[in-house]
Amino acid sequence: MDFSWPQSHIDFKQDLIAFAQKELNDNLIERDAKGEFSRENWLKCAEFGIQGLSVTSAYGGHDEKVDLPKAMLAMEGFGYGCNDNGLALALNAQMWTVQLPIAEFGSEELKTSILTKLVNGSKIACHALTEPEAGSDIYSMAARAEKVEGGYLLNASKRLITFAPIADIALVFAITNPKMGKWGITAFLVETNSEGVTASPVRDKMGMRTVPIGELDFKDCFVPEENRLGAEGAGFSIMNHSLEYDKACILASQLGAMERQLEDTVSFVKKRNQFGQSIGKFQSVANRIADMKLRLETARLLLYKVAWLKDQGENALMESAMLKLHLGESFVQSSLDAIRSRGGNGFLTEFEVERDLRDSIGGILYAGTSDIQRNIISRLLGL
């Protein structure tokens, strides 16, 4: 097995790291405390070409064909260079759960009218799937879209939606045929300034504070038929198709953050002296560092395997579930180890260590909780 990368991919990753370190980390403590999303940084990312990683060159992307390993490696670099985990989540959420489905299932009209604006940063989109009573059990959704002349009447309440309070466009999943179960789910692209759409204020949360999260309500909202994404009943397939990519690339940014976290922690324990020697010489500290390194490298292997499988057109349901479970849990534990290794300073906001722990908790919840990933793995093993 060849673990090498094309030099062009490595160069792009390094350029992205340098860009992120220079342009995206200013005033992060203040922005995190206030829960502020930086539209300026979003546009900088679009200008650099980050949003184009999930789209072909025909619609403003990088290459004639989406290069998933390149995109995954780039977003790993983004997580390393950008300390703003919320921005990383926001970028990946739009790229893989909205842009990719439009590129794969949308009409030419939707691609030219919507996709290009998402890539250039002039529009922001959200993926509206979760509901008050439909989270892990997403097929119990209450959202309904009734066929009417020229389109559909959409009634739905969606919650815990990244970008909901400020999104221009929402990819909404609703049931068009209740008798068909999961095959009765259909996807729609809805402009949030449409009549009948209400967005909540930004919700306060434990971590990922720089990306707005909230609710979207749709009451008798008319959606033109041309804004349906794919065929009626294709929502289940669209959802599963994008979520495998989503898990790989959202977690790629977390992997980059874990690498930065490890390097910073090693540097600290080498310099910090107690009892006449660096604290890295104490076995309890050194063991924590070794565990951080082990988690990083095992997660990297799983991530690269998922990216390779999807690039080969293969199913990666088992591998993506293992990746989501292992990397999500690893980031939490390594964030705890980074704080423990710094003692009291790790608990203080000004040292920018505790923020990673708060942000890491989201990784065991969004895109399928750790418990759900265990369920998927066990079922695929025949249990």
Image (cartoon, rainbow, N blue to C red):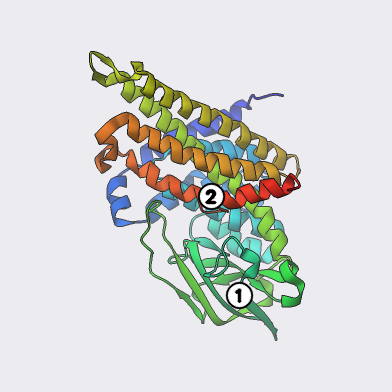
- Which residue corresponds to the image point at 30% horizontal and 20% vertical from the top-left? 279
Residue 92 bears which disc, if any?
A: 2
- Which residue corresponds to the image point at 47% horizontal and 27% vertical from the top-left? 291
Left or right: 357 as drawn, with respect to 216: left
Left or right: 187 as drawn, with respect to 32: right
* 41 over 252 or under it: above or below: below
Q: Identify the residue under disc 1.
A: 142
Element under disc 1: loop
Residue 44 seen in this snapshot:
no
Q: Amino acid at mark 1?
A: Ala
Left or right: 154 as drawn, with respect to 30: right
Q: Position of residue 117 (x, y in %)?
A: 54, 59
Q: Position of residue 371 (x, y in %)?
A: 57, 51
Of all residues shown, which one is farthest toward the bottom?
149
Q: Mark 1: few, some, or many residues within 10 Å (few <14, many ≥20)?
A: some
243 or 323, nearer to the observer: 323
Residue 115 seen in this snapshot:
yes
* 359 over 219 or under it: above or below: above
255 or 337, nearer to the observer: 337
Residue 190 bears which disc, if any?
A: none
- Which residue corresponds to the image point at 25% horizontal and 35% vertical from the top-left? 344
